[in-house]
Amino acid sequence: MSRIRIIFERLRAQGGKALIPFITAGDPSPALTVPLMHTLVDAGADIIELGVPFSDPMADGPTIQRASERALANGIGLRQVFGQVAHFREKNRDTPIVLMGYANPIESMGMDAFVDAAAKSGVDGVLVVDYPPEESEKFTATMKAGAIDPIFLLAPTSTPERIARVAAQASGYVYYVSLKGVTGATALDIGAVAARIPEIRAATGVPVGVGFGIRDAATAGEVSKTADAVVVGSRIIEEIELSAPDEVLSRVRALVAGLREGIDAVAGKAR
Amino acid sequence: MNIPYNLPDASGHFGPYGGVFVAETLITALDELKRAYAEARRDPAFQAELEYELEHYVGRPSPVYHARRWSDALGGAQIYLKREDLNHTGAHKINNCVGQAMLARRMGKPRIIAETGAGQHGVAAATVAARYGMECVVYMGSEDIRRQAANVYRMKLLGASVVSVESGSRTLKDALNEAMRDWVTNVSNTFYIIGTVAGPHPYPMMVRDFQSVIGRESILQMPKHCGRQPDAVIACVGGGSNAMGIFYPYIPFPDVRLIGVEAAGDGIETGRHAASLTAGRPGVLHGNRTYLLQNEDGQILETHSISAGLDYPGVGPEHAWLKDSGRAEYVCIDDAEALDAFHKLCRLEGIIPALESSHALAYAARLAPTLSRNKVLLVNLSGRGDKDMHTVAEKSGISF
């Protein structure tokens, strides 16, 4: 059974919901990435989304764009990201890692080499923002053969036909983009999100994570009432930006622990 | 003798190129656009209005002009110029903007957005927005804003807001990223007018179709000048819309060479250029698979060309297909050669060409002397050079 599936089955049994923080590999510095990943887990992360930096992050708002630019300036590419995942796996065998990024670095490395390296380093899922299902059937099949879950996006604009199309290829979980916009936007409508989740969960048969625009513990808690997982990215990157180098880990730990509490408070359980 | 050609396929692919590589949020909008465009394409009323607008607002057909003095000076093939520089707003970009703005109106979208490099597409988009009473926001890299101050002012005069893009290399590719971000946020009331034959399907096909009026007119005009079609059609290629516009109708004519001219900037060997087909390799950017200038990690490289309109690290996917299939040839011309052709055309023909078009002219100047006098070259003079006064003067050590 995949690590992602184990997590969601355990949470379902416990009545809990998953917290999925996002950081960009190599931001703020390559040396901090693995310590940050361990800190996220200590603070209550169930799954980590690790951003692969790209020069042209079309779906990201200014915050994650800046993280991507810093990581690229630090010389981080896919090969280094795999090294960081392998390093993280030396101490952690349980927490799933989902790489999130754009198609071109993968195309450049080659699909087979990418999946091979991902599997060997201990990656569990891959979300490619600009690979919709119709352009990635072969990639999806290659990933599944390598026991890696292809994670797909769904959006407020997705029609029932689109949801069915994603359902046919998705495994692990699906990522519901909670608003029309880029990452880090602020116009999240919890009611509108909640209205869509049951339909998506029923159609896809996999857990539904919700992200884009979740900035505090209260919102995380509200979203977790209907979603199976809550994804928080830009808010964490902002915390990293606001921190002096020696306080990055402690401040991120406090922020993520707060999000964890927000989610667990709704579930009515102490972790 | 005509060879059938029916690309892209239903899902927007030209062989392995093209496609729809975008985030899920945009898929429904692209499906809606695809349907709306397919209907408009079949609607005689839409086509009749488009024709009317092109004739009376744009000033079409644009003439074909025999550059006799320049041809004589070169001493070989006869060079003809397709005068897109004489269009309203001074470049071919308006052909596409009229079509897409009419489509936006038909789809009930009151707000249009556009990206621009040299500013020609931004000006054309601002122009049609004024013409049809729409709100217009143009994204432009801050580096390009600096290089093209006059066009920025033109856009503002026309009522558009110009948003300076500070991310990445602060040029056309970053403006495109930012326009995509706007579109994904305002998708319900906004129509994105992409200015070139790139982006996700149906844009490469749709922009090509709107621009192909250039080639269709040429096919009617050339026999009147020289009794036949040209031996070669030459056009500059950044994203590649003026080239697709003149190439596409000529694809079924096997005796007509199609030559696309990329920007070699300071020279291919310096790495400071914008020649994606010559020096790039396939990848995915801005919604389609095509040739890209990228490093070994798949990060997109910064490009350089004296002409802002060619300063783009990708190229339309149909050009990638035409290159691989061998139907078109792609060559490149550096900044210095383009400038030389620019000055020659000014002095010998009394025409000030855009620096983009000067790349196509420069290749014609290289090719013509190798051919006999009865050979015919048709160059797409895609825009006029008024916008480039500042850049050219700077190169000559003159500041205004």
Image (spheres, coloured by chain):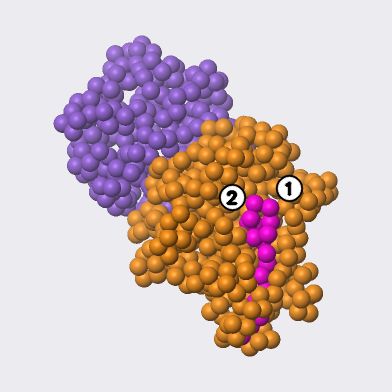
Chain colours: A purple, B orange
Residue A101 vertical placement versus B243 (above, below): above
Residue B121's mark?
2
| Amino acid at dot 1 | Ala
Residue B56's mark?
none
Could you say whether the residue bearing mark 2 is in a helix, strand or loop? helix
> Which of the 4 image quarters holds residue B254?
bottom right
Q: Residues within 10 Å of mark 1 (few under 14, many from 20)?
A: few
In this view, the residue in front, A126 or B205, is B205
Question: Which residue is disc 1 drawn over?
Answer: B38
Q: What's the CA distance linking mark 1 and mark 2?
A: 23 Å
Give residue A251's position: percent from left, percent from top: 23, 25
In this view, the residue in front, A76 or B190, is B190
State which tag comes first along the sequence, 1 or 2.
1
Q: In which quadrant of the rendered image does the C terminus of chain A lie?
A: top left
Q: Residue furthest bottom?
A: B372
Give residue B172's position: percent from left, percent from top: 48, 50
Q: Is residue B83 left or right of residue A244?
A: right
Residue lying at 69% horizontally and 56% vertically, measured from the top left: B87
First to last magenta residue range: B76-92
